[in-house]
Image (tube, rainbow, N blue to C red):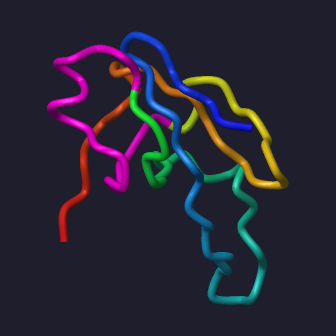
Amino acid sequence: MKIQPLDDRVLVEFEEEKEERTASGLIIPDTAKEKPRTGMVVAVGTDEDLQSKVKVGDKILFAKYGGEEIQMDGKDFRIVQRSDILAVLKN
C-alpha cells in the first residue's frame, strides 16, 4: 500500500530511538521523554511551497505529539502537518 499525503502534510517513518538508562541502570521509557522525535520523510503532500522545503529522504525533527500515528507493513509512521515540523536535519 502507498500513502500520498495531501496539502501541507508529510509522511514520516520513525527513527528507532536508542534505549536510555540512568547512571544506576534504570531504563527511561519513551513516555518520560519530552524531546521532539526524528524521522525520515517518506512522502510529501501536494503543497508546492512545502515540496520546495522538504524532500523525500530528508531527516526531520518534528513535535513529539504532532500528527497522526499509523502503522503500515509492520512499521510505524506519522503524518504530520507543516506546523509540526521543527527542522530539517543536515549532515
* Residue 52 x/y as whole percent: 15, 31
Residue drawn at point x = 61 percent, y = 67 percent: 17
Please state, as top left, top right, bottom left or bottom right, where the N terminus lies in the image: top right
Vertically, is 19 above or below 5? Answer: below
Query: Outermost residue toward the top?
Result: 7
Report which quarter residue 28 is drawn in. bottom right
In this rendering, does residue 66 appear at all? no
* Residue 81 x/y as whole percent: 43, 20
Residue drawn at point x = 21 percent, y = 17 percent: 48
Tell me if residue 50 is in the magenta stretch: yes
Residue 62 horizontal side relative to residue 55, left or right: right
Please state, as top left, top right, bottom left or bottom right, where the C terminus lies in the image: bottom left
Residue 62 horizontal side relative to residue 67, left or right: left
Please provide the residue range marked out in magenta. 45-63
Residue 31 horizontal side relative to residue 46, left or right: right
* Residue 40 x/y as whole percent: 45, 54
Q: How many marks?
A: 0
- Return the residue nearer the eye: 57 or 20: 57
In this rendering, does residue 74 appear at all? yes
Query: Outermost residue toward the front?
Result: 1
